[in-house]
Image (spheres, grey):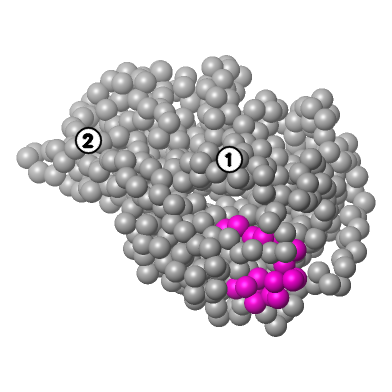
Amino acid sequence: MRIATARFVRQSRRRCFSLLLSLALSLLAACGSSSPLGTPGIDPSREVDDALLPSEAQLRGWQTEIDAFNGGFRPAGSVHEIAYAQRLAAQLKEMGVPEVSLEPYTVSRWSAKTARLELLGNGESEAVPLVSYIPFSGNTGAEGLEGSLLYLPGLAAVDLSDVLIRLLDSGAVTGGLTGLLRNLGELLGDTGSGLSSILAAISSLDLRGKIVVYDLPRLTIPIGVLSSLALHVTDDAGTMGFTTPFSRPFLDMVVAQVVTTALKAAGAAGAVGIIDYPKEAAQGSYYPFFARFLPAAPTVYLDRDVGRALKQRLAGRPLSPLKAQLTLDALEEEVEAYNVVARLPGVSPLEIVLSSHTDGTNSIEDNGTAAILGMMRYYTRVPPAQRPRSLRVVFSGGHFGGGGLGQYLEAHHDELQARVLAAVEIEHVGAREWLEVAPGVMALTGLNEPQVIVSPLGAVFERESALLSSQMDRSIVLPPVLPFGEGQAYRNEAGLPMIQYITGPVYLLNFGIPKVTSEYTDYALMHRQVRAFIRLVTNLAAEPAGRLRPGLSES
């Protein structure tokens, strides 16, 4: 099934949101056409030469190599991220890319030296198995902190179905992270929102000096929230119905930050979050994006089963609080790391940017670098006369620490404005869907993870994004209304047209899961996707400059 929907003006979008709240199945008919989108004709000279493509084995090798850097766990500014950036630069040079550089930038490095939770009593201590912690959430020092454990009930039952809809309706999420944080703050003060219910639960108890145990709420939305906004949907297998639930940890991390910030404001000394997944999926959960900007209480995580056992122990001691020591001892410093920047000249000095990031939790976060290595291998083998545009590669660093890409865009603003026709950001390629298929049982579903393509508005970009989607089942083309992906900085900070490809599987933000590389990545799918990305870039490069960036001349 392929669906193309009309672009929304603000008023019609608000009408759609009110229908979404009631999950009205008539929404798609109300908001757009269900007629198939015709595939545009392609000039045969633009077709991909399959003989020049990297092999599936080469793509697997480039991704597998990421695990050589601390098992794939490369926090922002870490020695492992820096070493991986240096390796990427060397690989581009080995392919024959003539202009490759490592450009320094400053980033916040936060690395946990010790994360521990111990129950205290009768002069003894008992370690509680952790699955992770919230980076940037605080630093107890090596001595840790002591306090009474207090369970905060009710958070898992909070209805958060309105949160994404209200954020969309505000229109300000198009402002990226800054807009998202601002609107989260507004929702906290809105008594009708699910987030305000979290605040109410927190304010109902005296949390001062306590180590608060809570269930991390999960944000589940119907796929229809996205498909109703879509410029195009490819769902050949019919697995993304309007009411199909979509729940992923990358959505939950927004709520996690709201909770820990509210706990800090309420005077909590620390927090213990219980992730609503079995250990296999909770292990190594790493949600770094918001604690850098908002105050937070030092927080560690338990999986569902360990959390349930701890809650039972607390419930059995209503009159004698259980004491604990929480230690989150971290190294915090500003360090110098590197963006990898490369340029492959074409017939024209005007450029298409290919971009991904170098820090991450595992080999799929981010294997966009591996996909782009494959693309650059292809383009270095194409005769120069068949490269109508130059290609600029930006492997930005430190997206977990608020670093590389923003600083690169600021430093190169004038150059980018004069040369760049469009940017293509590629993240999390070849992802297989891995879900809790039965209570406590995680398994591959046999499907690929739903894919999001964010397209600029405009005939050429919408056409090419739809063509890209048509080559990838379970994909949705969205207008730029949600802050998906690192590539939004090209749009929000540099004002450049940007196509973003991204997925968000359950295991995306987890370190210490080797199966991400060996089982959860579909390398045959990745190979097809790389071919589709090459076709996208080749088609964009053949367009007149003014059709991609009005006012930018060919000279």
Q: Quadrant of residue 329?
A: top left
Residue at 46% of width from left, 64% of height from top? 89
Question: Where is 540 relative to 318, above or below?
Answer: below
Answer left or right for 183 relative to 65: right
Relative to 148, does residue 135 appear above or below in the rendering?
Answer: below
Q: Residue at x 79, y 40 (%)?
A: 551
Mark 2 falls on what kind of element?
loop
Q: In front of the other: label 2 or label 1?
A: 1
Quadrant in which the N terminus appears: bottom right
Q: Position of residue 219 (x, y in %)?
A: 56, 39
Q: Residue at x 31, y 21 (%)?
A: 267
Left or right, 58 with reference to 466:
left
Label 2 Cα neighbours within 10 Å, binned few <14 / some 14-19 / many ≥20: some
Query: In the image, what residue occupies the spot 41% across and 45% down?
Result: 105
Kind of residue sitting beneath label 1: His
Q: Is residue 532 visible?
A: no
Query: Is 391 a magenta residue?
Result: yes
- Kindly identify which residue carries mark 1: 413
Residue 97 visible somewhere in the drawing: yes
Q: Which residues are magenta?
A: 377-393
| Residue sitting at the far bottom | 51
Q: What number is the disc on residue 34? A: none
Numbered badge on residue 140: 2
Query: What amino acid is labelled 2 in the image?
Result: Thr
Residue 86 placement: quadrant: bottom left
The one nearer the camera, 335 or 130, is 335
Q: Could you tell which of marks 2 and 1 lies nearer the N-terminus?
A: 2
Q: Find out whether residue 482 is within the magenta segment.
A: no
What is the CA distance from the residue labelled 2 to the residue labelled 1? 40 Å
Q: Residue furthest front?
A: 555
* Label 1 SS: helix
Could you say where residue 14 lies in the image, as x and y percent from the top left?
Answer: 77, 27
